[in-house]
Amino acid sequence: MAPRTRTVLAGLGLTVLLAGVLTACATGSGGTPTQTGAGNDSTEQEVTAAWLDGGRMIGIVTQGSSSCIPTAEDVSYADGVMKVTLVDPKDDTPCTADLASRVTMVGTPEGADPAEGVEIEVTGDGWHGDTDLEGAVGLSTSGETDYLPSAGWTETDGQFVILSWGSSTCVPVVEKTELTSATEVTVTFATPPADQVCTMDMAPRGIVTTADGVDDEDVQVYAILTGGEFDNVRVPINPN
C-alpha cells in the first residue's frame, strides 16, 4: 500500500464525451504509469478516492484521457478490502489526447462501512493501483440518494471530487476553482453552449478539481458551486 501523501454505481456504464479535439484512442486510457518489478507485465498507477453521496458512493480517480472514463465492471469486498476492475471504452471510441484526472463512480459495496474506511485495489487494462480511503464519522450506506450534489476530499493535497446528477452526456465543466475563505472553496462552472444536446437520463457525474492553499485537516470546508446549472449550491466536502 502506497503511503498516505495527502496527496458508478458498480456496473454502471458511464462514458462521457467532454469538449475538446477528439482523436481515436489507439491504446487504453489508463494514463502514464510506472513499471513494477521485473517479470510483472502490469504497471502501477497512482489512484485516489473520495466518499460521496453521504457514503453510498465512492469516486475513484485515475489518470488518462478526460473524455474516455473507464467504467467499473467488477466490484467485490471482503476483509476490509474493496477490489475494483476498471474497463476502458471500446477501441473505436474517440478520446481526447490529454492526460487528466478523471473519476469513475462506484457504489459502496455491501459490507463496507464508510465510518470505518476501506482499502481499495484497482485493476485496469495492463495496470493496477491502490489507495486507502479513511473512514469518516456520519457517513453510511443507509437510505436512498437524494440526487443532490456532494463532494469529498481525496488523498492528494487540495484535490476533491464533486458528484452531481443529470444527463450523462452533458457533464458540467469546471472553469475555475479558488479558495475564497478559510472554510469555502468556490467552484465556477462554464456556461454550456446554447445548442448543446443532452440525453434525457439521470446519471451520477464525477468531476475532480483542486483548490490550492486549502487546509482540510482541522476545519470543515464547503464547496460553493456556481455557474452553469448551479446557483450558489453549498455542499460540505467529506473528509478523507
Image (cartoon, rainbow, N blue to C red):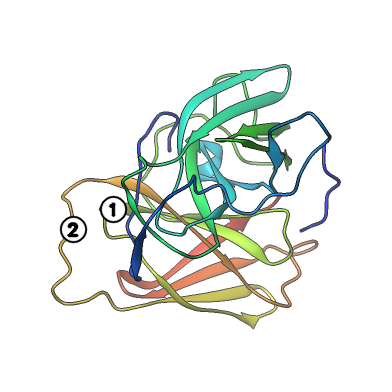
61 and 139: which is toward the camera:
61
Q: Callout 2 environment at 10 Å: few (<14), some (14 to 19), or many (20+)?
A: few
Amino acid on which the number 1 mark rests in the picture? Gly
* Furthest residue toward right: 3
Q: Is label 1 or label 2 in front?
A: 2
Q: Is 166 positioned to the left or the right of 96 in the image?
A: left
Between 64 and 158, the one nearer to me in the picture:
64
Q: Amino acid at mark 2?
A: Cys
Residue sitting at x 83%, y 35%: 37
Residue 57 x, y percent position in the rendering? 51, 39
- Left or right: residue 2 versus residue 17 is right
Q: Secondary structure at mark 2?
A: loop
Q: Please state the horizontal and vertical placement of residue 147, each as a whole percent of the image.
A: 35, 47
Q: Work out how far the residue at label 1 is from the one at label 2, CA to CA, in angstroms.
A: 9 Å
User: Observer-nearest residue: 166 or 82?
Assistant: 82
**Residue 161 x/y as whole percent:** 55, 57
Q: Quadrant of residue 216?
A: bottom right
Earlier sequence position, callout 1 versus callout 2:
1
Determine which residue is flagged by label 1: 166
Q: Is residue 210 left or right of residue 16?
A: right
The quadrant of the image that shows the N terminus is top right
Disc 1 crowd rating (10 Å Cα; few below 14, some 14-19, many 20+) is some
Element under label 1?
Answer: strand
Q: Position of residue 87 (x, y in %)?
A: 47, 35
Q: Which residue is located at x 76 percent, y 58 percent?
A: 7
What's the mark number on residue 69? none
- The one nearer the camera, 228 or 73, is 73
Residue 176's place in the image compared with 123, above or below, is below
- 23 above or below 148? below
Q: In the rendered structure, are the residues bearing label 1 and label 2 in contact, judged by CB atoms less than 8 Å apart? A: yes
Name the residue rendered at 41%, 52% in the picture.
Answer: 25
What is the number of the mark on residue 198? 2
